[in-house]
Amino acid sequence: MTERVIHARDVRKNYGERRVLDVAELNVYKGEIFALLGPNGAGKTTFTEILEGLRDRDGGEVTVLGADPATAGAAWRTGVGVVLQDSQDYAQLTVREILTHFASLYADARDVDDLLHAVGLHEHHGRRARHLSGGQRRRLDVALGLVGRPELLFLDEPTTGFDPEVRRQFWELIADLRAQGTTIVLTTHYLDEAEHLADRVAVLAGGRIVDIDTPARLGGRHLAKAVVGWSDEEGAHHLETDDPTAAVLDLAGRYGGSVPGLTVVRPSLEDIYLHMIGENA
Ligand SMILES: Nc1ncnc2c1ncn2[C@@H]1O[C@H](COP(=O)(O)OP(=O)(O)OP(=O)(O)O)[C@@H](O)[C@H]1O
């Protein structure tokens, strides 16, 4: 059976009278990329910070890498890499100096040059952090999350502010880490990022988990009807159907071959997600 890296049950958090988190159950297994989705204020940061041992909870059970993050010690912490939304301030140091410093804190740190290449900062290794662009700085944050070879890596909105090319490179980096056996928990507002990277996603709304599934099946997406579209001299036509193949064959017969302007569309992850959080608003 696959090893469970994270187990959370009945996890609750209140601020004053207000309950902002109430997670019935969530498990993350070794080697998977798990994405946490949800609108602003849904509780993603609160939940991940509880899992990271950075925030207290008001109730429930949490086990991460075999220990309770609320009481786990320094040895446990070396197994967990954390990349927060706001990076730390080390502006005066160069990229290499920062990585070398953090590498010295771990017994089995990643090689600094390997790391510079992995995050695409090797050409900027001598640059001071304050002179990096937003995307470069984010990559430095990710490198810092990886330096101690964590078994489990938390990434909070890692690609915010990345240009499309850098984002693609970053996705490759994350896929490589997974291939090396790292378990990754990713918070993101980009549905395409979740679809591209995640083995499973959880949708959080109002502090509760609405659904957990693969991107292809989330919210019954695989069962949703397809829309077949085409256009002829009378205009555009759309047909909702459970069996788009039959519909297309029928149309091909009707038009005597190719169907003009044919499209077959199933709901995107974004369509499904917006529908789910709309229902749970
Ligand atoms: N320290 C705090 N004191 C009081 N309320 C808080 C505190 N931290 C978070 N909250 C509230 O808890 C709720 C969940 O916040 P959280 O930051 O976990 O959401 P999120 O899903 O990470 O949002 P975002 O996508 O905007 O980062 C919000 O309503 C927020 O206002």
Image (cartoon, helix red, strand yellow):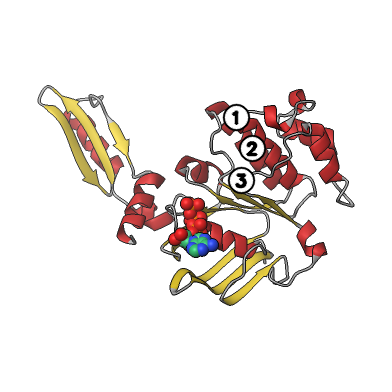
Which numbered circle lies on residue 180?
none
Question: Label 2 to label 3, Cα distance in Å?
Answer: 9 Å
- Which quadrant: the C terminus? bottom left
Instruction: Tell me whether the residue at label 1 lies in contact with that at label 2, contact meaning CB atoms closer than 8 angstroms.
Output: no
Position of 175 with respect to 121 (left or right) is left
Count of numbered labels shown in the rendering: 3
Position of 105 with respect to 261 (left or right) is right
Residue 171 against residue 14 in the figure, above or below: above
Residue at horizontal 80 percent and vertical 39 percent from the top: 99
Question: Label 1 to label 3, Cα distance in Å?
Answer: 19 Å
Instruction: Tell me whether the residue at label 2 lies in contact with that at label 3, contact meaning CB atoms closer than 8 angstroms.
Output: no
Q: Where residue 131 sits in the image (x, y, percent)? A: 68, 27
Foreground tag (1 vs 2) = 2
What residue is shown with label 2?
138
Q: Where residue 174 sits in the image (x, y, percent)? A: 65, 42
Mark 1 sits near ligand 1, with its Cβ under 8 Å away: no
Q: Where residue 238 sits in the image (x, y, percent)? A: 19, 37
Which numbered circle lies on residue 166?
1
Residue 173: name its quadrant: top right
Crowd class of label 2 (few under 14; some 14 to 19; many from 20; radius 10 Å)? many
Q: Secondary structure at mark 1?
A: helix
Residue 132 against residue 115 in the figure, above or below: above
Give whichever of 29, 202 is nearer the camera: 202
Q: Where residue 75 sits in the image (x, y, percent)? A: 82, 63
Give whichever of 260, 124 is nearer the camera: 124
Mark 3 sits near ligand 1, with its Cβ under 8 Å away: no
Q: Secondary structure at mark 3?
A: loop
- Which quadrant: the N terminus? bottom right
**Which one is earlier in the sequence, the residue at label 2 or at label 3?**
3
Q: Secondary structure at mark 2?
A: helix
What's the amino acid at mark 2? Arg
